[in-house]
Image (cartoon, grey):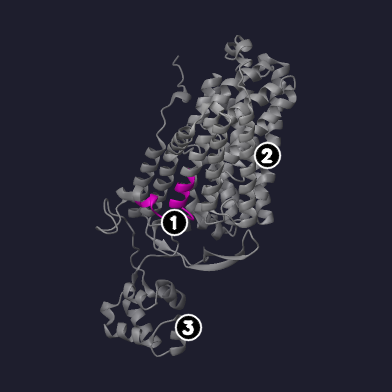
């Protein structure tokens, strides 16, 4: 009988490899799918400060494919238009300019020439409809293999550079990339101080004898870490302490992984302020970064509490009958070494306490700034830098971990370096949009045609069904791509305008993204962080999946409930 494959040892493609394959697929798709576009309009809405802001959204039923201009029809219409001064004034077209175009003759008429006199494609379409096109052939917008804007036009092999330099400091990709690097550097300093480690170790030691209270509190603590700074890989060293500690309390290693890694991903899924997930998605979606914090904060409390309760039901069953655990045999390794491992701790010094208080105060400052002052990417990046700088200064003053001035700089450098790969992912993913013709709905692109097709498939369905379909899509997508920022960059440019078509807010599209990408990270075998934690706990992924598939169903139900609530209250 053949031994089954160990899925935890399957070599999965690197995120860069996956994205490059998507780039190739996207480029080939442009040969098959004709380009299309939408008309857009400006709408006004109330911003976070109670003021009036505007946003460009798609006009429903305005999609059309790219066609050649029907020169004969358009020329005839322009000959009539040139004598209609009232219409010319309403369109903002000068009579002399139009007369000059007509003088060049019908054969020389082109959309580029018309654009120069303010008769854009949108203006002509609004006036005359699809009759302005020669609909005999749909056109494609396909990039070359290599090239730049200055030399031959954009080529898809230049997608990384073009993706990284796109946008500005207020959004994707430049602003998001800069934010990620600054935040990474700040947390590099904080992690170097050891304050977070010492705080959790102190928490563990002080909850001995309070087993039933300790686990829910720890679940909330790790969930808070996931919600505030996207805790994931950081769970691995904590698991080395938590696994024997939890087993010593009479539970099993599955409970230990749940109270650490799963909790962090529950926090990540329901985060109101994570700069690596919700902030990235909102920035790409074109809505205020960290907006909707009140709804998400309530969701975080409710979902974390219910997930912790789910864990405790399982944990109490194991405590009453340890041998019923599917990992009882593998946990024997830890039971033999409980005495030594469970007593490991780190001294929780005054310096650690000061740094943790400083972090908490800066986090309050960030929430206040975003909700009350409308702080955006530049301000948020500056606040995180202040957090890291002050943590480093306090560490030097209190001699925490023997840190010196140079250690602040080197830890910031290493922290930024750790997230450089994530920053590149954002730029690479943005490059995919350029290969598909860009994310501008008012420009002809393959992406707009794909978006229209998805929207058509969902057209007519209730808003709640459309939002739920987005949630399912994001959950399935995360089975392959586990990078939160990468998933946001890959999916939000499509999901955000799709929300406009479905009549739901882009905030709900972001909500569907974060719930789908967060919860599934605790299950997918391609997650390096999860596999690392399972390795520490000596749990085979197949055994983990047997437990986690049920919890995933429970979390998916909770996510569905909050998606429905968000649609019903019109979350903005």
Q: Nearer the viewer, mark 3 or mark 1?
A: 1
Locate the C terminus and report the quarter of the image it occupies: bottom right
Q: Earlier in the sequence, mark 2 or mark 1?
A: 1
Point out the stretch of residues depicted in magenta: 162-180
Category of crowding for the residue at label 1, using alpha-carbon neighbours closer than 10 angstroms: few (below 14), some (14–19), many (at least 20): few
Is 477 one of the magenta-colored residues? no
Question: Which label sits on residue 253?
Answer: none
Category of crowding for the residue at label 3, using alpha-carbon neighbours closer than 10 angstroms: few (below 14), some (14–19), many (at least 20): few
Question: Which label sits on residue 168?
Answer: 1
Q: Which residue is mark 2?
A: 303
* 551 versus 347 height, above or below: below
Q: Earlier in the sequence, mark 3 or mark 1?
A: 3
Tally the marks. Answer: 3
Residue in the foreground of this view, choosing between 89 and 272: 272
Q: Secondary structure at mark 3?
A: helix
Q: Secondary structure at mark 2?
A: helix
Whole-percent x and y of residue 254? 61, 23
Whole-percent x and y of residue 284? 50, 53
Task: Tell me the quarter of the picture where residue 555 sits.
Answer: top right
Q: Kindly give the residue lying farthest to the top in the view shown.
A: 336
Q: Which residue is mark 3?
A: 90
Is 173 one of the magenta-colored residues? yes
Locate the N terminus and report the quarter of the image it occupies: top left
Whole-percent x and y of residue 403? 51, 29
The reply to whether dot 3 and dot 2 touch (C-beta < 8 Å) is no
Give me the residue at 63% from left, 65% from top.
Answer: 51
Q: Secondary structure at mark 1?
A: loop
């Amino acid at each position: 009988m053949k031994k089954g494959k160990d899925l935890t040892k399957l070599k999965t493609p690197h995120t860069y490899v996956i994205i490059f394959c998507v780039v190739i697929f996207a480029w080939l798709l442009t040969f098959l799918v004709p380009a299309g576009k939408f008309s857009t309009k400006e709408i006004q809405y109330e911003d976070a400060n109670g003021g009036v802001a505007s946003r460009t959204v798609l006009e429903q039923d305005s999609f059309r494919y790219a066609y050649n201009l029907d020169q004969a029809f358009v020329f005839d219409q322009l000959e009539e238009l040139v004598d209609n001064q009232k219409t010319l004034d309403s369109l903002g077209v000068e009579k002399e300019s139009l007369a000059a175009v007509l003088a060049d003759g019908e054969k020389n008429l082109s959309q580029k020439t018309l654009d120069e006199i303010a008769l854009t494609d949108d203006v002509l379409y609004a006036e005359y409809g699809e009759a302005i096109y020669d609909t005999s052939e749909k056109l494609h917008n396909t990039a070359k293999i290599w090239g730049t804007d200055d030399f031959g036009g954009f080529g898809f092999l230049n997608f990384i550079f073009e993706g990284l330099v796109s946008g500005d400091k207020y959004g994707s990709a430049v602003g998001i990339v800069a934010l990620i690097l600054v935040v990474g550097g700040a947390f590099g300093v904080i992690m170097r101080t050891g304050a977070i480690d010492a705080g959790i170790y102190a928490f563990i030691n002080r909850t001995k004898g309070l087993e039933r209270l300790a686990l829910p509190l720890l679940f909330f603590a790790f969930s808070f870490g996931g919600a505030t700074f996207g805790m994931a890989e950081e769970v691995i060293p904590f698991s080395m302490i938590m696994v024997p500690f939890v087993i010593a309390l009479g539970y099993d290693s599955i409970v230990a992984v749940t109270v650490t890694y799963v909790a962090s991903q529950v926090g990540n899924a329901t985060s109101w302020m994570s700069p690596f997930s919700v902030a990235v998605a909102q920035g790409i979606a074109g809505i205020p970064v960290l907006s909707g914090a009140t709804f998400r904060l309530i969701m975080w409390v409710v979902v974390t509490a219910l997930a912790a309760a789910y864990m405790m039901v399982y944990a109490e069953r194991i405590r009453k009958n340890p041998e019923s655990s599917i990992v009882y045999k593998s946990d024997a390794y830890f039971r033999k070494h409980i005495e030594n491992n469970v007593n490991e701790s780190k001294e929780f010094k005054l310096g650690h306490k000061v740094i943790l208080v400083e972090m908490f105060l800066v986090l309050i400052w960030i929430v206040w700034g975003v909700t009350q002052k409308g702080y955006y990417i530049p301000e948020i990046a500056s606040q995180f830098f202040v957090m890291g700088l002050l943590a480093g200064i306090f560490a030097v003053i209190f001699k925490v971990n023997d840190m010196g001035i140079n250690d602040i700089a080197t830890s910031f450098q290493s922290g930024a370096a750790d997230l450089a790969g994530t920053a590149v992912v954002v730029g690479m993913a943005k490059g995919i949009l350029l290969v598909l013709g860009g994310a501008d709905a008012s420009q002809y692109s393959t992406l707009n045609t794909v978006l229209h097709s998805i929207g058509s498939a969902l057209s007519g369905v209730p808003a709640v069904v459309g939002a739920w379909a987005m949630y399912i899509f994001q959950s399935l997508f995360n089975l392959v791509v586990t990078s939160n920022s990468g998933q946001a960059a890959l999916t939000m440019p499509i999901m955000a305008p799709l929300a406009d078509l479905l009549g739901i807010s882009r905030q709900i599209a972001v909500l569907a993204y974060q719930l789908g990408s967060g919860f599934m990270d605790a299950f997918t075998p391609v997650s390096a962080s999860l596999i690392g934690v399972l390795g520490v706990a000596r749990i085979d992924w197949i055994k983990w999946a047997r437990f986690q598939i049920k919890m995933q169903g429970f979390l998916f139900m909770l996510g569905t409930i909050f998606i429905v609530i968000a649609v019903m209250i019109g979350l903005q």
